[in-house]
Image (cartoon, rainbow, N blue to C red):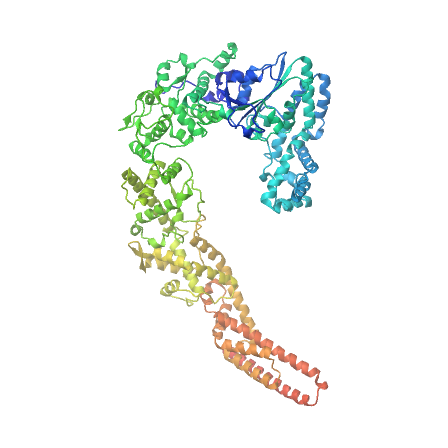
Amino acid sequence: MHKFLCWDPGSVRQVINPFAEHMPDTLFKAVHSDWALNVTPPVGTNFQEIKTSWREMSQREFLADFLSGERPHSLAAIVGQTGSGKSHLVHWMRLHIKSDKSRLVLLVPKSGTSLRAIVRMIIDELPADEQRSFLDTLQSAGDGTQTRGGQKQQLLNDLAQVIREEVLTADADEVEQLLVSHLPHLFQDPHMRVTHFLGENTVISEIVDHIFAPSNAQDRPEKRRSFQPADLPLGGLDFANASKLAQDAMQIIGLDSENYTQLSVDIINRNLDKAVARTLSFSGDRVEELMTRLRAHLKLQGRELVLLVEEFARLQGIDRALLQSITSHGDERLCKMRSAIAVTTGFFESVAETAYMRTTHIVDMDRSAGRSENHLVNAESLSQFASRYLNAVRLGRAAIDTWAEGATIEDNPPSRCSSCPHRSDCHVIFGEVDGYGLYPFTRRALWNAASRVDKALPESLNPRVLQNDLLVEVLDNHGDSIQTGSFPKFQLLEKLGGNMHLSQVSQLQLESKNPQNSGRWKAFLELYDGTGEIKNLDARLRQAFDVPEISDASDDVPTIEQEPSEPTTGGVTKPALSRDEILVQNWANNGSLDQSILNPLRNLVFSAVSDAIDWDMLGLARSNFVSATSGRPFQRGSITFARQASLVRSDLAVKLEIPGSLTSAKVSSALQGLLKADKNKFSWDFENGDRMLAAFLDCVDVWARSVEKQLLALCSPTPAWDQAAAALELLCVGAAIGGKLKAEPSIAEFIDGAFSNLPLECASRSRQMRDVYESLVGGRQNLSLIARAQISSTKGGRMGAMLVPSRVVPIIKKIRQSRWRLTQVPPSEDSSELATLYRRVQETLPTAATAEVGDRTEWLQEMDDAFGQGATRATIVSALESALVAAVGAGIGSNNTAKPLTEALERIRSVQFDDSLAAARSLEKQEDALSALTQFGRGRRNGVAAGSALANAAKAFLDAIDQAVNANSESHEAKYGALATSISSIEGALEAIETDMRLLNDISQEASDAS
């Protein structure tokens, strides 16, 4: 038996269809397994009180008890999680219960119908003369529900109205009352309807489809549809565009968003069924009346009613009314009623006490499907379940349909294996159940693989999970690989959860033996063995799949049929893995990296990679490129792990992602060894330590080369971008603005200024230029490190004291020739501190220079207007002091203005005001503001400020004198004669001031002429 394929992979999904109601009866019979059911009557007043009353019943025993004539009624609740086989059991019941003269069987399928169609189906069972009133009710919704858009509008209207009509209990608080009165406005608001409720893929569209449109396998209900907090629009533009009434509703919810949003959702959902029934135009009362009429009609015919519901959520809107009808026994005028409803455990736990107490059978499919006699799923019961599907796939739909034509409901389908030439060998190697072969599985492989996809094993079996995630995956997606001799592929193992038993060292050993075959070996050993050991499995099994022999591995030769249901390690006790090793192994198996080991691993890898780089060979200074925390291209944060929980930083210049190009086995083995060595004082003297160390050294070599490559790429200049040049250019710009360079500096002065300390503040007046300077001062340390690291000589990975002239001189010449224009173009993807600062300065420097020239020119005009053109500090101070003395002598000097003037005079004596004036006049003549960058540092900012302060103080002082003179002149007739003498004295003082000011102007004019 070699690479034999006995089914058509392309037809697998025609046979294995987990949606039971879409399965033809013939196919259903071919795959159905008659496992025992766990059944109980109701205990206590609710489902949660059931503890130990479960008893096993065969499916036929259950059916006989359900149909027993001794029971006045039957109500079976078939409960379980999604995919547990609830609808499958209802399907089986339908095949065994037929409509005849004694009973009417109504089936509510899980899909392929709508709520409206279900009601119509029930109405159609009434006599024609009794149908009319119910049909009239069903059709009374009007033309508004003839289109899908109209149906949505109607549901929103009905939902708003039923909430508005709700009568709250006496203990309802004020907020709940407010919400009941305001929530309807959200559903009636035009903006909210268009933006949130009337679109596709909304809860409203889902409910409308539930009421009016036939469902299919993709949208069939698994649970009741309901609103979630995310379905409510509560702020932002929605609030701005909403009506006042809708805004009021949002504001109420916003008072305590966390609690009131959930309260709002609860209010909506408890009214949702009423809204659905109203949109359907068939209330709960009418449902109960319809069921009563039907039962009365059947009573007259001498028949009983059997209602089979494949998913109770399919009836949302009338479900509780229908439940009330089927739990009501009625009187002798009504027929017996037997109902079996498939319902999720969660919903059944919420039904009213009355409905629960009238249940006759509770079937727990979570406790039934695939279980063995010991009430747990084991390899034998799992194989029995899977073998029917495997045989059906081999038979194919056509053969099954042919068989079913003459078969009774009790017959088992023929085994496709009976005519197979490989039957004998295959059943010995792979096993069989009742003549149905398990190929391409063995019992152990089926158990190992099923345990990976269904985590509930062995407590319970979810048939849908097994069908979808295992049988279809292997038989369809990987069937062809059997013929090509590549089964089982490593991709299959990854799909099924990855490596779980082979240690990382064992995986690395397989990779070292043969990298091409290692993936298949891992998949083969994990699925068909599961002991975690490297061994050669049965040669017949390996030959069937063409799996190569593993060199130097021991042979495992027991026959497959004798294998235990759970793998053993043959008595060999493997050392237990530590918590850290387990976390690394889970990560290697495509799990996420646990946060608790992320930083320890990152620290260890960072140190190892930093030490492994040959810094001298790179010509880079280590301290300028490596930092554990921040500020350097390579730092701890540069190291990321695939599937790590924390966010990956995108702003770092150097990034190292692990595992990268290396295999998960090698990296995980290296990391496990690294963690163990770290706890062992960095000794690798432990089991498999030599292999782990070898893997670690290989990994570090690859990682170090990756970091080196990125560092060189950062430093290597391109025609558009040179990091070292950019850093030096910015240093020179900072030196110019900070006053460290004269107007025409030499190259030596450029270098000296660039690397000298800058003052915290510059002489510039404009806010724009000061912002540029502050950003350069803030980034100066980093700029200096980058420049020195890349244009200095290095030794032992350390930065030398000498700059390399061949690198420095061209950079300085370029910045001098460009007249301070920054012309480099940082790569768009470069978000480093250097690139970001360069872009900012490049963009803002020309504008800042223009603003600074404008500001200096404006100040110069202010000084000329105040003191005259050509005035100097000496002439200004002398004239103002004389005026101050004259005013005080005349008795008209005000202390409020004289004192500030005195202080301003003292201040201007201590600054180089004349230098500030000269710098401003030189800037006035510049046509290119940026080319005058070095002159901004000569502005003597304190001199500028002192000049402005003196001008303001002098103006205030002279204005005060004028006011005093005017006030005295207007009231002189009312004063005594002595006042005339004072006025004469004042006039004399004013004449003296006028003489001094004229003298000041004459001196200023002479200075201007001389200039």
Name the side, left or right, on which 392 lies relative to 686.
right
- Residue 229, quarter of picture: top right
Q: Is residue 883 above or below residue 494?
A: below
Q: In this view, does 878 lie above or below 163?
A: below
* Residue 22 visible at all: no
Name the side, left or right, on which 669 lies relative to 474.
left
Name the side, left or right, on which 904 lies relative to 807.
right
Q: In this view, does 789 lie above or below 438?
A: below
**x, y (%) of residue 126?**
69, 18
**x, y (%) of residue 228?**
58, 37
**x, y (%) of residue 727?**
40, 57
Nearest the eye: 777 or 108:
108
Q: Residue furthest top?
A: 406
**Numbered marks: total:** 0
Nearest the eye: 774 or 744:
774
**x, y (%) of residue 227?**
60, 36
* Residue 1 visible at all: yes
Nearest the eye: 78 or 755:
78
Nearest the eye: 571 or 518:
571
Q: Quadrant location of the N terminus?
A: top left
- Residue 1001, quarter of picture: bottom right
Q: In this view, does 67 lie above or below 287?
A: above
